Image (tube, rainbow, N blue to C red):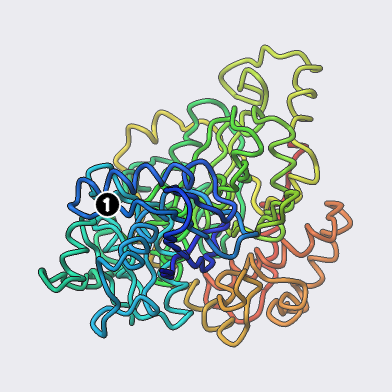
């Protein structure tokens, strides 16, 4: 007898339907074969299913069993096919039947079985739930611990049994299995941050620069001596970013679900990601990849912050590999078997010392580096990489008087309110504009995402501002990319000021952050 169960697999961040076909034949010797380009975990599901049957009180059919995971030319990986294979065997052997209450033709099923028949949590359930809704599938069966994650998607009935035995009893009408309710989701509630700008004394110029970066999604590089507060500023930076919208939260949660980094107690990520890889990270770790492609740090930073502390210590190949994602806001990973596109819309926050010892230009401490060492240190970061940075800023050491004083300091909440006001202006500006996202549905959210046509339409300068910019192009030797980044930065500064057109003072401040001084 033949049975068909609908399942799915993730390739990159995209889910694809997989039909699990189970055939039980009376002819030939007893055997159990799985075909369909599965990996080692799929092949080993035979033993897990066999043991789960025995320990769940089901009769394992002692006949010739053939399982086909179609389409056969699409790679399958992972243990998520255990449950569809088991249900296919039960259906094909007549131990359960298709009913009006539960229609296998309209139900997507995934899950890993343990040897005792319990269902284990699997990765990548959220993309599968999104696929089920897009395909018009009304029900989805997932392990109990994946239930809240799948229930995020509306108009989808989620069943989350804890074991194969419980699911069998439900299908036989011996036990009721409740539909998982959608968890209460409000990304703006219960936002807590470990670091706050209230704890940072001094560094007023740096705080202003970071406010601009947060408002427009601009990349930042801070340079200063050890102990100046660069890392503290970076770790406080997420606290002034606006909370994730629901659509952004779905984007981020989808990535973390596929990567297996989603917390069981939190079905939806509500705080913007802050990733801080060590400088020993490889370019594959930054970009993503592997035999079965997984998201890297730039995708895990999507809609958040990628912090590269001591950026000059990173391998040059790793830094150069970031140039294209910084420009295109996505990464295309190509392999012989095909290519996969992953999102990478993040704010790059880099920090470095001015020289190997860190005290070049310090007023109180003497630099011990030789000129050749300083030149070699600066050459570790290429000009094309630096050209993709919007804001360069010197961060001097904080004076003792400011550290010990009781000066009134703005909290992150106060700064975040101004950032949210500027973001709201951008949202209204880009409302009719469709962005260049992976699915073509997400709109442009920040000024940093504008292309050249957007800059022409939305970055209107006053006459004085245009004259100042023309003078600066020749004096600062700005590239075409640098010219456009100054306009984007000026647009953000104008948004913070609540001004429609970009004025001369906005351009002047934007140019101030482009003075690299041979970084």
Q: Where in the figure is residue 386, as x and y percent of width and height?
A: 74, 45
| Camera-side residue of 470 and 351 | 351
Horizontal and vertical percent position of residue 362: 61, 24
Residue 43, position as x, y percentages in the image:
48, 44
Packing grade of label 1 (10 A; few <14, some 14-19, many >=20) is many
Q: Farthest right residue? A: 474
Secondary structure, mark 1, is strand
Q: Position of residue 199 (x, y in %)?
A: 33, 42
Residue 5 shows in this picture: no
Q: Residue at x 42, y 60 (%)?
A: 26
Q: Which picture quadrant has residue 500?
A: bottom right
Rendered view: 510 above or below 444: above
Residue that numbered label 1 is attached to: 119
Residue at image position (85%, 66%) is 470
Query: Does residue 481 lie above or below 232 as drawn?
Result: below
Quadrant of the image containing the C terminus: top right
Instruction: State the residue at coordinates (17%, 52%).
Output: 57
Asked where in the image residue 346 lies, by quadrant, the reply is bottom right
């Amino acid at each position: 007898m033949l049975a068909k169960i609908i399942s799915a697999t993730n390739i990159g961040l995209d889910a694809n339907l997989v039909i699990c076909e189970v055939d039980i034949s009376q002819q030939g010797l007893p055997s159990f074969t799985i075909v369909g380009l599965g990996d080692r975990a799929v092949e080993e599901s035979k033993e897990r299913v066999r043991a789960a049957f025995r320990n769940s009180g089901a009769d394992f059919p002692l006949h010739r069993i053939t399982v086909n995971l179609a389409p056969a030319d699409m790679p399958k990986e992972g243990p998520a096919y255990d449950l569809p294979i088991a249900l296919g065997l039960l259906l094909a052997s007549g131990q359960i039947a298709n009913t009006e209450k539960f229609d296998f033709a309209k139900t997507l099923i995934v899950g890993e079985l343990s040897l005792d028949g319990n269902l284990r949590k699997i990765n990548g359930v959220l993309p599968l739930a999104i696929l089920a809704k897009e395909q018009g599938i009304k029900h989805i069966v997932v392990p109990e611990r994946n239930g809240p994650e799948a229930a995020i998607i509306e108009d989808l009935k989620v069943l989350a049994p804890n074991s194969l035995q419980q699911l069998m009893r439900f299908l036989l009408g011996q036990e009721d299995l409740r539909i998982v309710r959608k968890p209460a989701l409000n990304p703006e509630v219960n936002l807590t941050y470990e670091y706050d700008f209230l704890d940072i004394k001094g560094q007023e110029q740096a705080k202003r620069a970071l406010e601009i970066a947060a408002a427009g999604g601009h990349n930042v590089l801070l340079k200063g001596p050890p102990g100046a507060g660069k890392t503290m500023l970076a770790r406080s930076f997420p606290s002034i970013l606006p909370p994730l919208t629901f659509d952004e939260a779905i984007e981020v949660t989808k990535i973390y679900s596929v990567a297996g980094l989603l917390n069981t107690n939190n079905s939806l990520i509500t705080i913007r990601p802050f990733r801080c890889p060590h400088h020993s990270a490889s370019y594959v770790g930054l970009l993503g990849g592997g035999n079965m492609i997984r998201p890297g740090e730039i995708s895990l930073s999507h809609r958040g912050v990628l912090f590269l502390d001591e950026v000059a210590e990173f391998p040059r190949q790793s830094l150069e590999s970031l140039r294209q994602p910084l420009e295109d806001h996505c990464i295309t990973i190509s392999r012989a078997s095909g290519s996969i596109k992953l999102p990478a819309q993040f704010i790059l926050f880099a920090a470095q010392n001015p020289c190997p010892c860190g005290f070049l230009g310090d007023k109180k401490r003497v630099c011990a580096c030789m000129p050749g060492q300083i030149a070699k240190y600066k050459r570790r970061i290429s000009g094309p990489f630096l050209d993709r940075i919007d804001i360069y800023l010197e961060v001097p050491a904080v004076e003792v008087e400011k550290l010990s004083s009781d000066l009134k300091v703005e909290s992150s909440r106060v700064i975040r309110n101004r950032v949210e006001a500027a973001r709201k202006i951008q949202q209204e500006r880009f409302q009719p504009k469709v962005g260049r996202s992976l699915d073509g549905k997400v709109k442009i959210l920040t000024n940093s995402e504008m292309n050249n046509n957007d800059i022409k339409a939305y970055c209107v300068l006053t006459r004085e501002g245009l004259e100042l910019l023309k003078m600066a192009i020749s004096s600062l030797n700005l590239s075409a990319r640098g010219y456009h980044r100054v306009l984007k930065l000026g647009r953000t500064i104008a948004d913070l000021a609540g001004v429609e057109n970009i004025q001369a003072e906005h351009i002047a401040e934007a140019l101030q952050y482009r003075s690299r001084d041979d970084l």
